[in-house]
Image (cartoon, helix red, strand yellow):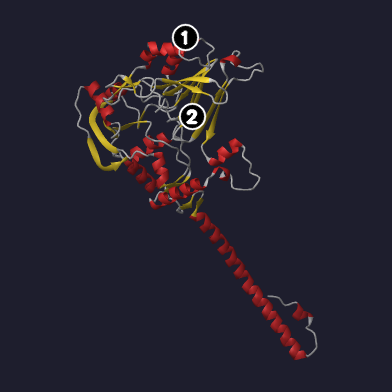
């Protein structure tokens, strides 16, 4: 990869060498400045047998890490750490502490992280920050920081911050505004960034999605539900799924001893108010996991012991690691359900605590997205169904337009026909009188007759 793929702590088992480069030096073409750059993975344990993931704590204590930080190999102006970990993961501080021990307290260190699928920023110390720019290409992250020669207690001589960040929504319209491109030609916003090839690709994607039925409307959401909102909020997507959809669509209404547990990473996007298309449902729930019955007669106490505090609130985020469809009572016995993705983890933890062996059973024909569809079909049908015809426009908009003007035209028609008939009748009566009385003009009585 010519130094473009960094694996500071991921090794090939066969060769005991890094898959990519342990580090690299980025050279600014215009500034002539140098960034020492690392690429770390968190302490991952489920790697395949062909690889080894070294613990971050061991790597930062290694000889090669200290050597490159000493500057004896190449002198550098700042350090960039690309880290597949949370923006405030304790390992971020582990790496920073090791850097500070060798490079001093005023070496600029910028972490660009990405693992927890959200927008996050944390100032780590006066000359270091951690930055995570959203998820699934919904955000373009911009970060800038001054170099050590410019630093003065974290601010310039005017007191301005030397580390800046910006979250930019990923749309061509926002990109165009951000770049301040000229829009005086009255072209549609975003059109200045489109190329011929890009336009053709956009239409091809649209036609493919339409052919797959992704624009088909399956229901209407009464409000917007947010994927990252905590379970205590009424507009939480996970609260809707765990507290409403699971009990109504999966559980037996006559029982009150059933619990569903799943990791909180499987719902991936917000569900917006209004029409729900097939595409929207896939965006919200891209993993159509099978549903499994794990076992019965599991006490609430054992359930809590098996998963510790993993289904309570995390320190930095509103959602817990695991979402449970209820709060277990210690002395109550439960039936436990989960998804195919989480099955092994759930079974292992329950087995370790209870000492039992479990034989999970797949529920035939029941999937996660099937539960969503059943709920939407039962509870969220639209008064009218809209099918999108092209990006940014739907057929119903045109239908409403035509219907409205047809109605207005009909009312005008119903009003004008009697009026025209009245005028014709009036003219007829006038001519009749003239013929009868010669040149005698109509009397005031005739002049006053109107329909």
Q: Is residue 230 above or below residue 123?
A: below
Tell me the element at label 1. Answer: helix
Task: Give coordinates of residue 395: x percent, y percent.
Answer: 49, 55
Give the residue at mark 1.
Answer: 102
- Residue at image position (20%, 29%) is 358
Q: Is residue 219 above or below residue 330?
A: below
User: How many angstroms separate mark 2 from mark 1 (CA)?
Assistant: 29 Å
Q: Which mark is residue 115?
A: none
Task: Give coordinates of residue 46: x percent, y percent.
Answer: 30, 25
Q: Is residue 206 left or right of residue 350?
A: right
Q: Are marks 2 and 1 in contact (CB under 8 Å)?
A: no
Q: Is residue 365 above or below residue 103?
A: below
Q: Earlier in the sequence, mark 2 or mark 1?
A: 1
Residue 333, can we see it? no
Q: Quadrant of residue 165?
A: top right
* 110 or 269: nearer the viewer: 110
How many other residues sit within 10 Å of disc 2, few (<14), some (14-19) or many (≥20)? Answer: many
- Residue at image position (56%, 41%) is 173
Location of the N terminus by quadrant is top left
* 154 or 419: nearer the viewer: 154
How many other residues sit within 10 Å of disc 1, few (<14), some (14-19) or many (≥20)? Answer: some
* 265 or 208: nearer the viewer: 208
Residue 434, can we see it? yes
Q: How many marks?
A: 2
* 321 or 424: nearer the viewer: 321
Task: Give coordinates of residue 338: x percent, y percent.
Answer: 29, 33
Task: Give coordinates of residue 276: x percent, y percent.
Answer: 43, 46
Q: Quadrant of residue 334?
A: top left
Give the residue at mark 2.
Answer: 133
């Amino acid at each position: 990869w010519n130094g473009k793929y960094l694996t500071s702590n991921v090794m090939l088992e066969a060769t005991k060498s890094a898959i990519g480069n342990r580090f690299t030096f980025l050279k600014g073409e215009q500034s002539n400045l140098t960034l020492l750059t690392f690429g770390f993975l968190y302490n991952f344990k489920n790697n395949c047998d062909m690889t080894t993931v070294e613990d971050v704590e061991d790597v930062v204590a290694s000889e090669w890490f200290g050597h490159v930080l000493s500057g004896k190999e190449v002198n550098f102006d700042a350090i960039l750490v690309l880290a597949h970990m949370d923006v405030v993961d304790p390992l971020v501080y582990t790496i920073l502490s090791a850097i500070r021990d060798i490079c001093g307290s005023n070496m600029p260190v910028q972490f660009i992280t990405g693992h927890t699928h959200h927008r996050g920023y944390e100032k780590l110390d006066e000359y270091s920050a951690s930055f995570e720019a959203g998820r699934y290409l919904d955000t373009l992250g911009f970060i800038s920081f001054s170099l050590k020669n410019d630093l003065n207690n974290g601010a310039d001589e005017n007191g301005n911050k030397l580390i800046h960040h910006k979250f930019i929504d990923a749309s061509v319209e926002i990109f165009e505004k951000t770049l301040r491109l000229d829009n005086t030609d009255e072209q549609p916003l975003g059109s200045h960034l489109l190329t011929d090839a890009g336009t053709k690709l956009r239409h091809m994607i649209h036609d493919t999605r339409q052919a797959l039925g992704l624009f088909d409307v399956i229901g209407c959401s009464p409000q917007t539900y947010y994927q990252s909102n905590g379970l205590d909020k009424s507009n939480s997507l996970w609260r809707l799924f765990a507290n409403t959809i699971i009990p109504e669509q999966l559980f037996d209404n006559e029982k009150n001893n059933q619990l569903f547990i799943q990791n909180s990473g499987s719902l991936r996007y917000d569900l917006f108010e209004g029409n729900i298309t097939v595409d929207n449902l896939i965006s919200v729930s891209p993993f159509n996991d099978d549903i499994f019955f794990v076992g019965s007669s599991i006490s609430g106490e054992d359930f809590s012991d098996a998963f510790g505090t993993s289904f309570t609130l995390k320190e930095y985020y509103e959602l817990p690691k695991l979402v449970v469809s209820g709060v277990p009572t210690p002395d109550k016995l439960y039936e436990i359900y989960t998804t195919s993705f989480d099955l092994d983890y759930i079974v292992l933890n329950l087995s370790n605590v209870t000492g039992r062996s479990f034989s999970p059973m797949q529920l035939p024909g029941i999937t996660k997205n099937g539960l969503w569809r059943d709920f939407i079909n039962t509870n969220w049908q639209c008064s009218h169904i809209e099918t999108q015809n092209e990006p940014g426009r739907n057929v119903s908009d045109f239908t409403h337009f035509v219907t409205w003007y047809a109605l207005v035209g009909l009312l005008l028609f119903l009003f004008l026909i009697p009026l025209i008939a009245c005028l014709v009748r009036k003219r007829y009566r006038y001519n009749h009188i003239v013929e009868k009385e010669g040149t005698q003009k109509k009397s005031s009585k005739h002049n006053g007759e109107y329909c």
